[in-house]
Amino acid sequence: MQAGGVLKSFVQLFFPETCAGCRERLREDELYICGECHNSLTILTPGERLAEYNGRYKSEKLIDEIYPLFGMMRDSIEIEIIHRIKYRNKQKLAHWLGQLHAKMITDYCDYDFVSPVPLHKLKLLERGYNQSELIARGISAESNIPFKNCLKKTVYTETQTHKSAFERRKNIRNTFEPVQGADITGKWVLLADDVLTTGATVSECAKVLKENGAAKVAVATIALTI
């Protein structure tokens, strides 16, 4: 066995990879999520995605389409996966989920760019990474849609967690700006984020993008709260 193989076996023996959903040890042929958890994910159908869009976002005319990969309920495997990429430094998992998203949902192949929902520079410094950017890069790598940072967060805001829909919209209002030199006039922009809850953040992002010339804005997320 080569030195690299020996080191890998040593690491797996004492620091085994565990499933992002159930935390059980993964088999050698499993990556990030065990087969049982993968099969139990609540993958949303095109009809379900359309119904959620019509019920939540169609009337606003800011977001043109939504592409959540799976539905997420309290105390579910899905919420454990999201917590791992958001709060537990599972950066490779976030990128892989972006790739999985692009493999399972191909409807957005005509978009010009995939762009992440940005973090404020202080929040980025605190966390060390932007999970939405990692998801966007994963989508880009699998779909060949060019990655582009179209927006920047200019105001540091409190976390949206535990806020009502009204409070979320008030908290996030006027906190984004287009990145200087990002030509989005007439473009179709696919916004990538981890979770779609009330939609306050992505709606504000879509508003800024359309005010600055974007022709169409869709949202691709790993999860949708249901």
Image (cartoon, helix red, strand yellow):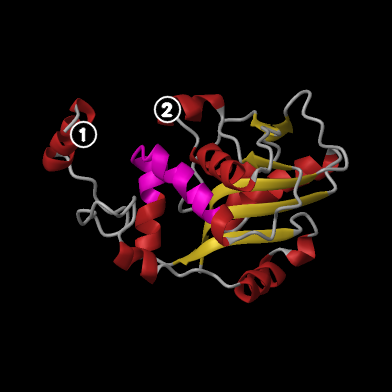
Q: Secondary structure at mark 2?
A: helix
**Which residue is painted at 35% across and 62% down in the image?**
77
Q: At label 1, which amino acid type do we have?
A: Gly
Position in image of residue 43 (x %, y %)? 49, 68
**Which residue is painted at 88% across and 42% down in the image?**
186
Q: Main secondary structure of the magenta part?
A: helix
Please state if 6 lies on the left or on the right of 155 as rendered.
Answer: left
Label 2 close to label 1 by CB (< 8 Å): no
Q: Nearer the viewer, mark 2 or mark 1?
A: 1
> Quarter of the image holding residue 154?
top right
> Farthest residue in the front direction?
1
Query: Does residue 169 appear in the picture of this structure?
Result: no
**Which residue is painted at 51% across and 69% down in the image?**
226
Segment colored magenta: 83-101
Q: CA distance from mark 2 to mark 1?
A: 35 Å
Position in image of residue 182 (x %, y %)? 77, 29
Q: Relative to the observer, which residue lies in front, 150 or 95?
A: 95
Task: Check the picture and name the quadrant holding the N terminus.
Answer: top left
Position in image of residue 23 (x %, y %)? 24, 55
Q: Would you name the residue on which mark 1 appears?
A: 5
Please state if 214 lies on the left or on the right of 103 as rendered.
Answer: right
Q: Relative to the observer, which residue lies in front, 138 or 184?
A: 138
From the viewer's perspective, is residue 124 above or below residue 134? above
Q: Relative to the observer, which residue lies in front, 10 or 46?
A: 10
Asked if residue 90 is among those painted magenta in the image, a careful observer would answer yes
